Image (cartoon, rainbow, N blue to C red):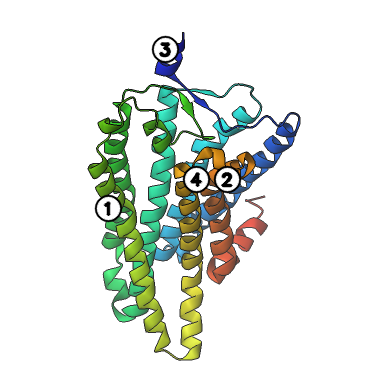
Amino acid sequence: MENQTISFYFNLTMFMKIGHYRYLAFVFCLLIYSFIVFANGVLIVVIARESALHQPMYIFIAFLSFNALYGSTAFFPRFLMDLLSDTHLISRLACFTQIYVIYTYGLYELTILCVMAYDRFVAVCHPLHYSRKMNYKVVCILGCTAWVFPACSLCLNLLTIVRLQLCGNKIYKIYCASWNVVLLACDPRSVNSIASTVATIILTFLPFSFILYTYLRIVLACWKQTSEVRRKLLQSCLPHVVSFAVYSLTLFTDTALSRQNRKGVNPFVAVVLAMEFIIIPPVTNPLVYGLKLPEIRRKIFKTLKSPKFT
């Protein structure tokens, strides 16, 4: 029976016994999930409906909102059930599916932010050539690359993990994560560390470096402008910088937590840090873009007041 459990099920062991407080936690997390769905859904609908927002920057913002719905839906329904359950077993198939969706969500966020950084770079540093460099064809190519590349790379990564022979089934996490599954491998040498390192560099450090480079060029370009022009340019770029900073911080804490000795971390702090990567970006992005960018803000208020919407 134990072998069958190890073979076909994983046990998520980070859940704490909080008694009746789990119902309060359930309601609180359900409200967060509802807000994510509503806020990002409104942003997508507004951008899709308003022809004035059919521009590259707003299309990429809609991509971010869609990705927020994609990632949070992979996490919240299962998490909400686990909050009310005394056992936290997840099937092997469901676990690997959750790994794929959550990790592609993380990579999609990075590649979309990469594309948005390039869009702002062209708009600020090459304004006279913006319509040519960011035409419909280019936007389609950038969008397809942002979605297809992470999906294909994660398929290869997940295939390596699925083939591992595991000697345990306890995952110290509130959701399935690839590193925690790798730690269960019977033979640590079965994981090609060199290939994993190269893949990590390609999938994370190169996009991060590109984003930092483009924002540095934007700052230098804005510095040469008048104060009024500089203010308008920085205002259009600020939401992207905030999104990138939030994503970087939550990704760093999640990665650090995965590598940390679990005995040295307070269980409550560990749960909060494990959740923020999936919760904070989907919550903050619609607030940042919906409230900071005046064009979107006006269209949102107009849509919410529309009789058809209500």
Q: Position of residue 290 (x, y in %)?
A: 57, 62
Q: Nearer the viewer, mark 1 or mark 2?
A: 1
Q: Secondary structure at mark 1?
A: helix
- Whole-number angstrom distance, CA of label 4 to CA of label 2: 27 Å
Q: Residue 261: tell me if it is visible.
A: yes
Question: Residue at left 37%, top 68%?
Answer: 212
Instruction: Name the kind of residue labelled 2 in the image.
Output: Val
The answer for how far apart the CA atoms under marks 1 and 4 are is 22 Å
How far apart in space, not on screen, are marks 1 and 2 (Cα)? 31 Å
Q: Which residue is mark 2?
A: 37
Determine the image quadrant of residue 186: top left
Residue neighbourhood size for the residue with mark 4, other residues' Cα within 10 Å, grouped as few (<14), some (14–19), many (≥20): some
Q: Which residue is mark 3?
A: 3
| Badge 3: residue crowd in 10 Å (few <14, some 14–19, many ≥20) | few
Instruction: Write down the residue under mark 1.
Output: 202
Considering only order in the chain, which callout, 2 or 4, is on the residue closer to the N terminus?
A: 2
